[in-house]
């Protein structure tokens, strides 16, 4: 299984609260790089959240943002 070695979280979904900035943002990016679909929940929309959305679309990662 060649694909699962580079994407060990493929097929999994992670919910990250506070994921639009700071440590939460870093966690979201790492999860996405590992193949997980990521649901980001945060209290407010920030430039960082908008940037993440664009980055995730470029990576063809699954992303849901709830701000």
Image (cartoon, grey):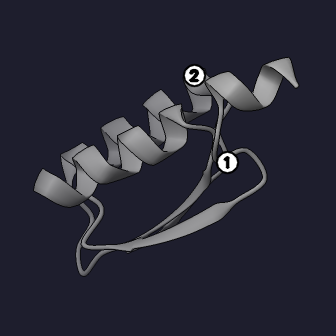
How far apart marks 1 and 2 lie (CA) works out to 11 Å
Expressed as whole percent of the image width and height from the top left, the position of residue 9 reads 64, 47
Locate the C terminus by quadrant. bottom left
Q: Nearer the viewer, residue 17 or 50?
A: 17
Q: Quadrant of residue 29?
A: top left
| Residue at 27%, 65% in the rendered image | 45
Indicate whether 31 appears above or below 65: above
Q: Residues within 10 Å of mark 1 (few under 14, many from 20)?
A: some
| Residue at 30%, 63% in the rendered image | 19
Q: Quadrant of residue 7?
A: top right
| Tag 2 residue | 58
Q: Residue furthest left?
A: 22
Q: Nearer the viewer, mark 1 or mark 2?
A: 1
Indicate whether 37 appears above or below 15: above
Indicate whether 56 appears above or below 17: above
Expressed as whole percent of the image width and height from the top left, the position of residue 18 reads 24, 72
Q: Secondary structure at mark 2?
A: helix
Judged left or right of residue 30, residue 38 is right
Locate the N terminus by quadrant. top right
| Residue at 73%, 44% in the rendered image | 10
How many discs appear? 2
Expressed as whole percent of the image width and height from the top left, the position of residue 28 reads 38, 51
**Looking at the rendered structure, which numbered label has been put on residue 2?**
none
Expressed as whole percent of the image width and height from the top left, the position of residue 8 reads 64, 39
Residues marked 1 and 2 touching at CB (< 8 Å)? no
| Residue at 39%, 40% in the rendered image | 30
Q: Nearer the viewer, residue 61 or 33?
A: 33
| Tag 1 residue | 62
Q: Nearer the viewer, residue 25 or 57?
A: 25
């Amino acid at each position: 299984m060649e694909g699962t070695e580079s994407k060990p979280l493929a097929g999994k979904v992670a919910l990250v609260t506070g994921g639009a900035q700071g440590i939460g943002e870093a966690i979201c990016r790492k999860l996405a790089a590992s193949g997980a679909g990521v649901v980001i929940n945060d209290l407010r929309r920030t430039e960082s959240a908008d940037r993440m959305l664009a980055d995730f679309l470029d990576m063809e990662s699954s992303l849901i943002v709830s701000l």
